[in-house]
Amino acid sequence: MTVGGSAPDPAPVPSPSGVPVEDLDALVDRLAAEQQTPEPGTAGAGDGTAAAQGDAAAVGASRPEPPLLAGERETLEGFLDFLRATIRWKAEGLDDAQASRRLVSSETTVTGMLHHLADIERYWFREVLGGVPLEDVGYRWSDGHDTRREWSLAPEASLREALADYLAATDQSRAQLSGRDPEEELRGGNAPRTVRWVLTHMVEETARHAGQLDILVELLDGRTGE
């Protein structure tokens, strides 16, 4: 970027492989231009995208607000459910190609993030909080401990399937949490901890990924919002 025309734009910084790395401003401009001129048959070129974004708006409007006057567990659960619904809202308006698209140098994608969040729910609420044996937890995208597999997508990776699985995992989590006291000490996992700790950690984990989705979705289709 020039200031008062006093200096030329800097050259792209090469990566260790020698390939120039696109700076953030250039990436945003390029993706915005692509969204404005979609190719026939791709996302943004027809009624399918509008319908999908209508579904996303419906999910956003129906997000449960955390209770203002409630006990500790109910308050934490309320914030976690709001964030879970935000994850779904952000992903709902995309198609499979967009949700599988890598915008950063890592394997991070929208679909991969849903895989990760679903199996994280299973780890903390079924294996740790529920004490379910590893082989019975029902991990879908990994073995529950090597999380790298969650981010590695097959060419035909389905966003619909990932969303449905995430919803199923969160339903299981709620069932596992029902009636548990925040003070209860848990023995699952690699160290003793309380139900309170698990709930607070999952609020933090889900909020962090919701923030990442904010940026990915804005780059993919221009949508913004809380």
Image: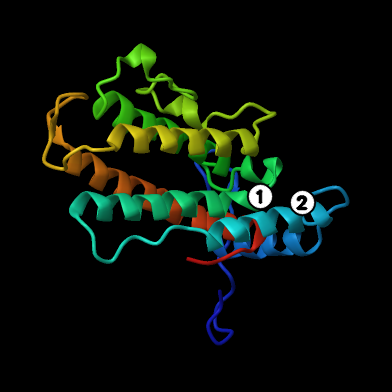
Question: Label 1, on which residue?
Answer: 94
Q: Earlier in the sequence, mark 2 or mark 1?
A: 2
Instruction: Identify the residue at image location x=66%, y=50%.
Output: 94
Q: Amino acid at mark 1?
A: Leu
Q: Is residue 23 above or below residue 112?
A: below
Between residue 122 and residue 43, name the one nearer to us: 122
Horizontal placement of 27 versus 141: left or right? right
Neighbor class of circle 1 (other Cα within 10 Å; few <14, some 14-19, many 20+) is many
Give the mark count: 2
Q: Residue at x 53, y 82 (%)?
A: 3
Q: Quadrant of residue 128?
A: top left
Instruction: Kindly state the secondary structure of the residue where label 1 is placed.
Output: loop
Q: Whole-Å distance between the Cαs marked 2 and 1?
A: 8 Å
Q: Quadrant of residue 199?
A: top left
Between 114 and 68, the residue placed more toward the observer is: 68
Circle 2 sits on which residue?
43
Q: Residue furthest right?
A: 40
Front residue of this view, candidates 75 and 11: 75
Q: Quadrant of residue 18?
A: top right
Pick the residue in front: 98 or 105. Answer: 98
Q: CB of mark 2 within 8 Å of CB of mark 1? A: yes
| Other-residue count near label 2 (Cα within 10 Å), few / some / many at <14 / 14–19 / ≥20 | many
Seen at 24% across and 65% down, the residue is 69
**In this view, 121 is above or below 226:** above
Compared to residue 72, the image places residue 4 above or below, namely below
Horizontal arrangement in the rendering, residue 13 relative to residue 118 (left or right): right
Q: In the rendering, at what x and y percent does residue 95 appear?
A: 70, 45
Residue 98: x and y, percent? 67, 46
